[in-house]
Image (cartoon, rainbow, N blue to C red):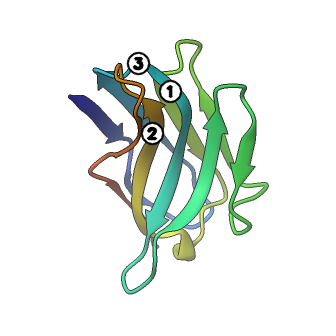
C-alpha cells in the first residue's frame, strides 16, 4: 500500500507565502514524477507544478514565476513554495505521485488534499 500525505496548507493574506509538503511512503518500487494539482470550488482540477526523476519541472501558466517545486534527494518528498499568493490561488491542493509497483505496473497515487485559502 502506498501513502501520500500532504501538509502545510492554511489561511494566508494576499501577497503572502506558504510552503506545501508531500511525503510518499509504502510499497512503491520507483517514482518517476511528483507534483501538485489544485481544485477550486466549481472548477476542474488543474496542474500547478510537477517535477520528474531528472528534476525537470513544469508549471501551470497561472503560477509561473510565483511558485517553485522541488524534491528531496531520495525523491520521496516534494515541496511547493508559493509566493505572492492571490485570492484566485484559493483551492484544495492535491499531491500526485507517478510510479511503478514491484510488479512493474504504472500507477498514479493521490493524497487527500490540503486547503489553501488566500483572503484578507
Q: Report x, y in % for residue 26.
A: 27, 21
Indicate whether 53 appears above or below 6.
above
Q: Which mark is residue 31?
A: 1
Q: Report x, y in % for residue 115.
A: 34, 59
Q: Which residue is mark 3?
A: 29
Q: Report x, y in % for residue 70.
A: 63, 32
| Badge 3 element | loop
82 relative position to 107: left or right: right
Indicate whether 49 appears above or below 26.
below
Mark pair 2, 3: CA separation: 12 Å
Q: Quadrant of the N terminus?
A: top left
10 relative position to 63: left or right: left
Question: Pointer 1: residues within 10 angstroms few (<14), some, or many (20+)?
Answer: some
> Residues at badges 1 and 2 in contact (C-beta under 8 Å)?
yes
In this view, the residue in front, 91 or 48, is 48
Q: Residue furthest bottom?
A: 42
Amino acid at each position: 500500500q502506498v501513502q501520500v500525505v500532504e501538509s502545510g496548507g492554511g489561511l494566508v493574506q494576499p501577497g503572502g507565502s506558504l510552503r506545501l509538503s508531500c511525503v510518499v511512503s509504502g510499497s512503491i518500487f520507483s517514482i518517476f514524477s511528483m507534483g501538485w494539482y489544485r481544485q477550486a470550488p466549481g472548477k476542474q482540477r488543474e496542474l500547478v507544478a510537477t517535477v520528474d526523476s531528472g528534476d525537470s519541472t513544469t508549471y501551470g501558466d497561472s503560477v509561473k514565476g510565483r511558485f517553485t517545486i522541488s524534491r528531496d534527494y531520495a525523491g520521496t518528498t516534494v515541496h511547493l513554495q508559493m509566493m505572492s499568493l492571490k485570492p484566485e490561488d484559493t483551492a484544495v491542493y492535491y499531491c500526485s505521485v507517478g510510479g511503478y509497483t514491484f510488479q512493474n505496473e504504472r500507477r498514479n497515487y493521490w493524497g487527500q488534499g490540503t486547503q489553501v485559502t488566500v483572503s484578507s
